Image: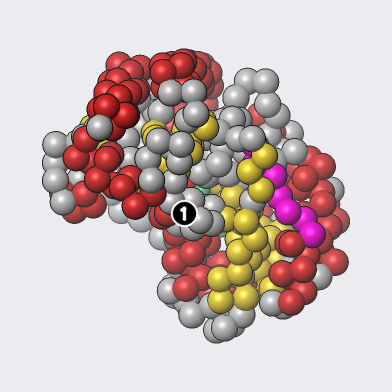
Amino acid sequence: MAEKFTRTDLLPLWVADMEFKIPKKAEEALIERVRHGAFGYTMVSDSYYEQYFNWQKKRFNVDLEKDWVRFSTGVVNSFFWMVNTFTEKNDSVLILAPVYYPFYDAIRDNQRKVVTSDLINRDGRYEIDFEEVERKIVEEQVKLFIHCSPHNPVGRVWTKEELTKLFNLCQTHDVLIISDEIHQDLVRKDVSFTSALAMDENYFTHLIALNAPSKTFNLAGLLHSHIVIPNKELRSRYDDYAKTVHKSALSTMGLVTTEACYRYGEEWLEDLLEVIEFNFKLLEEKLVGAFPKIRLTDKQGTYLAWMDLSAYVPPQEMREFMEEECHLAIDYGNWFGGDCDQFIRINLGTLPKYVEEAADRLIAGLKKRQGK
Ligand SMILES: Cc1ncc(COP(=O)(O)O)c(C=O)c1O
């Protein structure tokens, strides 16, 4: 907090990790591995693949093959590598804004060109502007598209129809899709998530999926994630790139804990989803109840609430209002691009009492502003 907000007295609701302990049995598996006491190089066991594949099959109807899977120390690392593998300097890479800010970094820091298509906000539900996407792909000769599915920060879980339209456009114009599915498990009960890997195999010529247990089970610090490349030619291009950076690391702790989470963690996850839903409703009832012009985005996925405060706080005063008046450390809309200065993002992966506290602080701050 000191680094990011230059102070330490704020209620922390920004970075997307959670304040929950991992499933007990996963913690036990980790402790048992620690007790073993030796931490040399490791390999991926058959039982790991079995648990990972079962999870993907059961939850998303995805059939994986061992051959398709590569490992990484994180999804952000992975999409940086994808940009390097599959594009050249100055090539155009498409993203849908607003979006998770490292997407921009992966493109810019590798001297590629960021091409954005803004999502359309229809009364708190975001949609893709397919016409603009196609126009930009053609005009900018886009080579790669990094897709956030489910989408951080706008909380959309894309429908199969939307994915079909998007993937058809990419295939028609020979654009490779990197589908970042790190939030795939964090989906509201009445909503169904479609993985890119559950789409028609014809799309596999233009598709790489990234997923991980880190958001789902709060394991980000264990540095472990998956790159799934069903197409042989794309796989061999990635493998050639991986050789040049000698990319062979595996996280022992990540593997052990992930396997246990997939094996034992389903009930824990179901409970977590209830807490997140409860927190979202709590925030909505309190905040929108008190200030009806706050536009809280319909959250279908992720544990992140995205809201438009423009009716009450001018964008240029947002930071001062959040930190000086409300004492909250949140993500600011302008970090995500797409002209979202009037938005904030609040992390709901915490105890309801902290969400309530955040809502109370916002309400008090807004009342004070109105009294001015
Ligand atoms: C869309 C998205 N991708 C990737 C990450 C981070 O992935 P990792 O910690 O595995 O690098 C996040 C974290 O919030 C995210 O929201």
Give x and y (percent) for residue 225: 48, 49
Name which residue lies at 44% across and 46% down.
342
Name which residue lies at 23% across and 52% down.
4
Q: Give the residue furthest to the front.
A: 372
Res. 165 visible in picture = yes
Give x and y (percent) for residue 183: 54, 39
Identify the residue under disc 1: 336
Residue 317 lies left or right of residue 98; in this view the side is left
Name which residue lies at 76% across and 47% down.
163
Residue 49 lies left or right of residue 131; in this view the side is left
Give x and y (percent) for residue 333: 43, 48
Q: Which of 230 and 187 is in front in this view?
A: 187
Q: Nearer the viewer, residue 184 or 70?
A: 184
Q: Which amino acid does label 1 sit on?
A: Phe
Image quarter of the C terminus: top left
- Numbered range of the magenta stretch: 125-131
In the rendered view, tell whether residue 96 sits above or below residue 355. below
The answer to whether residue 353 is magenta is no
